Amino acid sequence: MLKKKILVGISILIGLLILVFLIFEVFLTYKMMNFKDINQLKDVEYEIILGAGLYGDKPSPILQERLEEGLKYLELHPNTKVIVSGGQGSNEPIPESEAMKNFLVNKGINPNRIIEEDKSKSTFQNLEFSKKILEERHADKDEVLIVTSDFHLFRAKEIADYLNIKNEGLPSKTPISLRVQYMVREFPAMIKLLLQEAFLDTKDIV
């Protein structure tokens, strides 16, 4: 009898987890469909493009999509500066920020408009360290534009809000072949973020 109750309890727990997962994925899809279009965004002094891995010394496909979207905004807003945020992974020959800067310079962006943040290892650090750059430039009270993948923007904005960064978001499109995989990965990442925020443990936030 006890064994049966345990199995029923486990089944209920698994069912609840699946339900929460499905609700989150529907919510994330809704958010992805309702972020502002680039032409709806107002002019800001700084945008922040979040890193996403390298292939050799070149941006990964996901990162290239982010850079392309950030580039569009920079071309529409010639006075906006950009913080390219991403440190160097153990298997990366250069910091992500350096590869990101190289990409934008090769696309015609003046290097003087680009600020590198090359120490971060997570989304939380991307925004935490970028905020320090904004503080050094006395721009931390102004609204900034966060550029990242559509599946990632909701979590990035949650972290920015937690850090008291006034923000708007610009999503880059994720290839269909990769979107489901990354959306599924966002669920545990978001749960981890909420738990860490609740217990004020920020050092390992993803």
Image (cartoon, grey):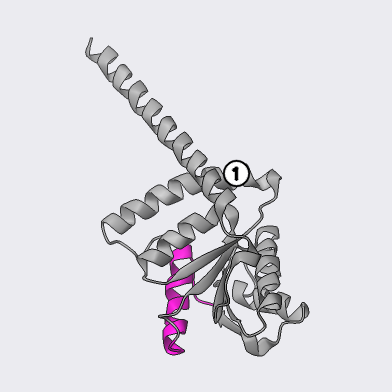
Identify the magenta region.
118-138
Q: How many marks?
A: 1
Q: Is residue 24 above or below residue 120?
A: above
x 58%, y 77%: residue: 43
Seen from the viewer's position, the closer of residues 72 and 185 is: 72
The amino acid pointed to by label 1 is Gln
Q: Position of residue 148 (x, y in %)?
A: 58, 62
Q: Is residue 129 above or below residue 123?
A: below
Q: Position of residue 11 (x, y in %)?
A: 36, 21
Q: Which picture quadrant has residue 67?
A: bottom right
**Left or right, residue 81 beside residue 131:** right
Magenta span main SS? helix
**Left or right, residue 15 beside residue 121:** left
Figure quadrant of the N terminus: top left
Seen from the viewer's position, the closer of residues 88 and 157 is: 157
Figure quadrant of the C terminus: bottom left
In magenta segment, residue 178: no
Q: Which residue is mark 1?
A: 181
In magenta segment, residue 127: yes
Q: Position of residue 92 (x, y in %)?
A: 62, 68
Seen from the viewer's position, the closer of residues 187 and 82 is: 82
